[in-house]
Image: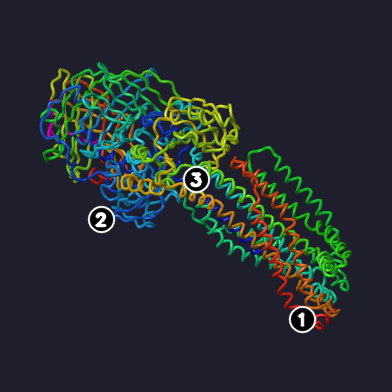
Amino acid sequence: MRATANRLVSTALALLWVLSGPILPQEAPTGFSRAEEPRELTFPADHGSHPEFSTEWWYLTGSVTTDDGNLYGFQATWFRNALVAEREPRASSLAVRDVILFHGGLIDVERQAFFSESQASRAASSWAGAETGRLEVWLLDNRLSAGPDTWSARFGAGGWELDLELAPAREPLLHGDPPGLSRKGPERGQASYYYSLPRLEVRGSLRRGPDDEPVEAVGQAWFDHEFFSRQLAESQVGWDWFSVALDDGTDLMLFELRQRDGGRASTSAGTLRLADGTRRHLAASDFEIEVASTWRSPAAHPHDDDYPASWKIVVPSAGLSLEVEPMAKDQEHRDEAPGAMAYWEGLSRFRGRHGDRQVEGLGYVELVGYRGAGPSGL
Amino acid sequence: MTSGVAVFVAIALAGQAARSSFVSAVEAISGKATHEVVATGGIEEGRFREFAAMPAVEAAQPVLEGRAMVLAVTRDGRRESTSVPPLRILGVDPFFAAPFLTARARDPVVPEGGLKRFLTASGTALLSNTWAAETGVEAGDALVLVVAGRERILRVLGLYDLSVLEEGAKDTALVDLATGQELFDRLGRLDRIELQVKTGRESDIEAHLVATEMLQRPQRRGERLARMIEAFRLNLLALGGLALVVGALLVFNAAQFMVIRRDRLLGQLRTLGASRKALLAATLAETTLFGLLGGLLGLMLGGLLAHALVRAIGRTITDLYAFVEVDIGGLSLGATVAILVGAAFIAASAGWFPALDAARTAPRMVGLRSIGEATYRLRLPLLLALGVGALVLATAGILLPTRSWWPGLLAAFALIATGACWTPPFMGWLLPKIQEATERWGWLLPPMATGAVHRSLSRTGGAAAGLGVALAMTVGVLIMVGSFERELDRWIDQAIQADVFVGDVSQRQARDEARVPAAAVDELRKTPGLRGIDILRAVEIPLGQRSVRFAGVEWSLPEARRFEILEGDPERAYDLALAGAVLISEPLARHHRLGVGDRLPVSGRSGPVELEIVGVFRDYSYDRGLALTGAGRFLELFGELGVRNVALYLEPEIDREKTVQSLRQRLAGRYALEIRSNGELREEVTDIFHRTFAVTYLLQVIATMMALVGIAVTLFGLFLERGREMATLRSLGMELDGVRALFALESILMALFPVLISLPLGAALAWVLTAVINLRSFGWTIRYHVPWTAVLGTFALALAAGLVATIAPMILARRQSVALALREE
């Protein structure tokens, strides 16, 4: 559940010196396909872009350990946002239909230092784009692509750079009910096609600064891919999202949609997969998330809310109970641009019990809508 | 004084206005870029990703820029012609622009959804609110532009707050990069990539450049313009300075006159017990006040004059370089004070010596001019020596081996100083000779007149020097313009030979973007009665620290020699150039010290090559320099960048005017082309030339006026002062006619000296202007030509002014009772 795209793309557009008014239409985009019917996802074709939908994103979150034993968490996101469904024929190859946005984040756990970066570009020429039928999405030199056996990802932020090989270890995990169709709002079409690839084996190099030598890095990553044309309901102001691959082979994804009135949307949901591959859709009533502590962003304005900073997650029917602690308090993406939205996306440790076993894992948490206006306040 | 200050102020203001508006126009676009990558013929758009992703690059943005003429505005389906200034079209990428902006919009007026259209729909633009307010264009209107010989529509989506860009760039229309590429037909290309490079990492970028690309500082683009403006400004300031010198000489004279005229009063005051110090102070206060008043009046006049000058300069630069709109600013408080203080100082120092003399003199001696004259004459050797010093300086300025033009200007100043210093000694030497000679011949009046002028040398010498300098300036400028005019006529005759010339209608407003569409060229080739056709393509290429124009020509009539070959074999040079070698213009040869046999480095799309130089030709069209080669070589180097101009030669029996008319009719509506006959183009080139010299003409008029007024005022003063002498003469029996004749003779003598001095001085000045300053700054030689009619006419005017000045004193002399005038003696 990563519906930051609309916000982020419009943030990028807001950087346009000449504008600050509404950029993206408030009404549901017209002319695009909707995530309404169940869809059979086929791979690797569906790893590629789906331009018939207005919005799409590819998320890579994970952690690596370097030669010297340091732990790093990383996040790399490529968003695609179509400005129009059908563009008039244009002579220029730079004519815009889709905008690609890249967000990168790196947490140096030992130093508790967080680096983030964002850049938008038109999907045109060699500058940025997303291929259909295969995984290849890029913005300048930040690129995620699939080779015959392994995937490769290269991206950076604030001087650091990761050059990774990713090996898918398990079948794609389809979210929603029916599998692949993830409902977000009460209305038809307020949904997305959504799947993940947990437990990608990561091997590669990390460079901490432009003048540093790259060091070997090994770890694990979680890949998310989601596409849709209309998703959140008007009443929703944000969400909390959790993903973790536990050391007993369990994969867990949960999202909780928060209502304007402070309540929890009934479409909050999750997916659980056991080590044997058994997959289970979790409805809102199947899990509970309790906030144990909060954290206030140093850049927060008086009207901003505090972020939740640790949680207790319980899935009673699965015998799963987890405590979640961020590996660093401040993993907030802050954009200086006026009208831009801040969000928190950070490496976190999940620890607890699954049945009668102790479990543990590093995962990612995304917190959206705590600062600034909610998604509908664009 | 007033006029001197006025000219100076006007020029200072005009120069300042011109410079500041160019600087801001350049800054507006470059914003915060530290470097930029440019390439001949444009940069391949895919290169942007590579530069933007480099670790040495902090931020990068792709830019397309061009100019377009606005032909009409369409509102609610109605099309109305308009004459608004051309638009600067800036193709930007909103996603990469943010780090380069100097300010952010405070009050955007982009309508809802407008931005999406800006990015996705072709031909959409945002205009500055200032430009829109000035032209009456509103959001929702469509502008009919002429780009590359065709009409294009640009829809106004909304307005942006000008605070986004800097002042002076209000004519900027923002379009998306894609719209820019489509508008200017530069698909797949960028004009430049602006960069913020990390300190000390330039070499990383340089290592990444391909042959056609060049890394430069953003100032470079504006540099040529800025240098041009600076040259203009300094030239003008120098001329203004000269005007000020002349003004100072005049005021010196006037102040001296004021003091001397009242020497009797001063004497009486001394007799009554006034101290020397008090007298000196009173006199100085008076002259200072006089100078201040003159300065104030000058400031006011200067403000008015500045507007005229600014317009003239703006036109010139628009004609020659790029379209520009110049706004005049105010003179700073500091400058105002400086001018006033300067004027007062000049006046005070002018009054100093006579005041000192008057204060020093024993009361009984006051009134005897001979004392003052004696002290004055003693200073003649000093003046002579000063003149020698100035001449040495002038020679040094001329001989200094430099390509900079300011030593030349210094030489011009020094020459003038020499002339001014030597005038009184020259008069002191020549006048007694004339007196003796005329006495020997038994004439009565000429020796009297000569004697009178000689006796008052303290004033007549200064006046003649000032007037001589003023006249010399006039003569110098006359000769310079005359020489250039004549040279240009010859050049036009050679360069403009074809019968019909075809270019983009926007070519004067959007020089670099002007194109004749290929389809139109094909049609032109089918013109009935066509004997031959010239097709010109051109591109700016970097050469050393400058850029030069590189043109590829297709000349179907090789026998039509378009340029005069100065170096190289005139018979073979053209053929060799058309076959792939190059001809270079004289300014290019001089600026870059190139000649026949040397090689011209050119970076084409497939890397650098060196072309053999087979000839140097005379050209006045591009001071930066022009290189010509055949169309084949040009296309091989740069590919098809579009045709700039087409010239048609018709069979002798074909009616030229009818052909022009029918071509206009045939091509109208489909292309936005300007079709001109030979005569029309000649006229236009001549007009541009005259506009270039508009400032010079204006200054020439001012200099002439100052000279004439100076002569009249000085003589008038001299004659008034001699009322007593006249009365004496009349009491001794001289007829009124005799007095008149004496006055007239003195006038002629007084006007004759400036004329005598100004002829050699003006000729030398003109030589320095053409052969030293012009050659150094533009690189072209101009053959010396004296427009005798104009020069002699000026002299006649000077003499006439002298005579006119005698009229009033003569009338006074007639009215004045002899007894009354003598009573004072």
- 2 and 1 marks in contact (CB < 8 Å): no
Residue B411 vertical position relative to residue B546 in the rendered view, above or below: below
Residue that numbered label 3 is attached to: B321
Indicate the secondary structure of the residue bearing disc 3.
Answer: loop
Q: Which mark is residue B76?
A: 2
Considering depth in this image, is B407 or A351 the residue closer to the camera? B407
Which residue is depicted at the point 50% across and 40% down? Answer: B219
Question: Do badges 2 and 3 share one subunit?
Answer: yes
First to last magenta residue range: A280-292
| Residue lying at 35% horizontally and 52% vertically, measured from the top left | B107
B744 or B722: nearer the eye? B744
Spatial CA distance of label 1 from label 3 is 62 Å
Q: Which residue is mark 1?
A: B816
Q: Chain of mark 2?
A: B
Using the image as rendered, state which of residue B558 and residue B346 is in the foreground.
B558
- Of mark 2 and mark 3, the one earlier in the sequence is 2
Mark 3 closeness class: few <14, some 14–19, many ≥20 residues within 10 Å: some
Q: Give the farthest residue toward the front.
A: B653
